[in-house]
Amino acid sequence: MSSPSDSSATGTIATASQYVGRFAPSPTGPLHFGSLVAAVASYLQARAQEGRWLVRIEDIDPPREQPGAADLILAALEAYGFEWHGPVIYQGQSRPEHDAALQTLLDRDLAYPCGCSRKDLADAPRGPLGAIYPGTCRAGCDAQETAIRLRTTDEPITFDDALQGLQTLRLEPESGDFVIRSRDGLIAYQLAVVVDDALQGVTEVVRGIDIMDSTVRQIWLQRLLGYDAPGYMHFPVITHPDGDKLSKLTGAPGIPTDEPRPLLLAALAALRQDPPKSLETASTREIWQWAIENWSPNLLIGMTAVSIETLPGNVLTDDPPMP
Ligand SMILES: [Zn+2]
């Protein structure tokens, strides 16, 4: 197994299949319960198929990052008994590959500079993914400082999500050409994720439904760059009782690392797995063993949200009592 203190080790878990999954947190704060559930879902989906599970820190947006957060996240994963393959991947280190993909798209005229300001786009119509870019700079742009946008078409883009079923979006009319490098030079999340998933051979992306809107844009990028499309599984988002997504912004605290078992069992409950009572006194290792052997993601089919009210214990405490 690999751990934060031993990040160059190679995994020792048997990998009998070609499955490659990943957990890709942004280092904007410590791991909270919502991100723990994301880690558990992607881990179980990989381990149940005897595949590889990678950890990738998405450190491509320095203004949003919190110093030390990556180490806190890795320490929490280790405390909860996750075992990942190979060294931890830092997305910022793939900048040369991100830049090469960006250049390929520019060279093939699939992307173009856009000097529009936020104000220029204030009156743009809105679609399901936000403002629809009206194509102002498609034919050229004189601005000194520009973002780079990817051209889109009105062809329907479809994918069959393992839990949410068939999803379709026409990018040009419903979202418009989208930014793949910001005006201040940062590679956009959509492009970085697509390049990194391809570099690392990821075969299935397992993540929260709150990111599902990004998927068609990522599939479009995969097509233009000639990458294989991974499978997708978007599980329900974990919410406060009022329906707001659990996040740093909505006050979700970092998970306690001294006693992982209560929140590990709560994460399994959030994923609608039904751990037997006997696991409440079991070791972390035994909980994982049960969870891997009994992983049934189909119990989540069609579910879009899980409220923390429905879960055992208090998942928002820094120091939860044993169940
Ligand atoms: Zn523009």
Image (tube, rainbow, N blue to C red):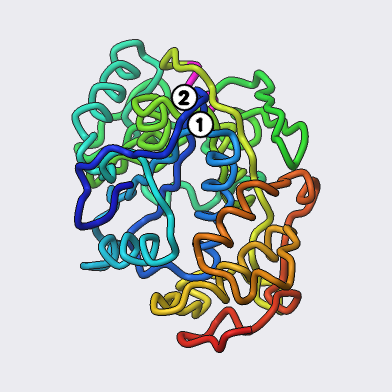
Q: CA distance from mark 2 to mark 1?
A: 5 Å
Q: Position of residue 282 (x, y in %)?
A: 58, 70
- Is 220 covered by the magenta stretch? yes
Is 15 situated above or below 263? above
User: In the image, what residue occupies the spot 59% across and 37% down?
Assistant: 175
Q: Residues within 10 Å of mark 1 (few under 14, many from 20)?
A: some
Helix or strand or loop: what does disc 2 sit on? Answer: helix
The amino acid beneath tag 1 is: Gln
Q: Position of residue 66 (x, y in %)?
A: 27, 67
Q: Position of residue 230 (x, y in %)?
A: 54, 26
Is 131 situated above or below 73? above
Foreground residue among 144 and 62: 62
- Is 120 covered by the magenta stretch? no
Q: Residues within 10 Å of mark 2 (few under 14, many from 20)?
A: many
Tag 2 and tag 1, C-beta contact below 8 Å = yes
Helix or strand or loop: what does disc 1 sit on? Answer: helix
User: In the image, what residue occupies the spot 35% across and 39% down?
Assistant: 12
Q: Which residues are magenta?
A: 217-223
Q: Which residue is mark 1?
A: 218
Q: In the drawing, does residue 243 fall left or right of residue 153?
A: right
The amino acid beneath tag 2 is: Leu
User: In the image, what residue occupies the spot 70% across and 71% down?
Assistant: 278
Q: Main secondary structure of the magenta part?
A: helix
User: In the image, what residue occupies the spot 56% across and 67% down?
Assistant: 264
Q: Image quarter for residue 314?
A: bottom right
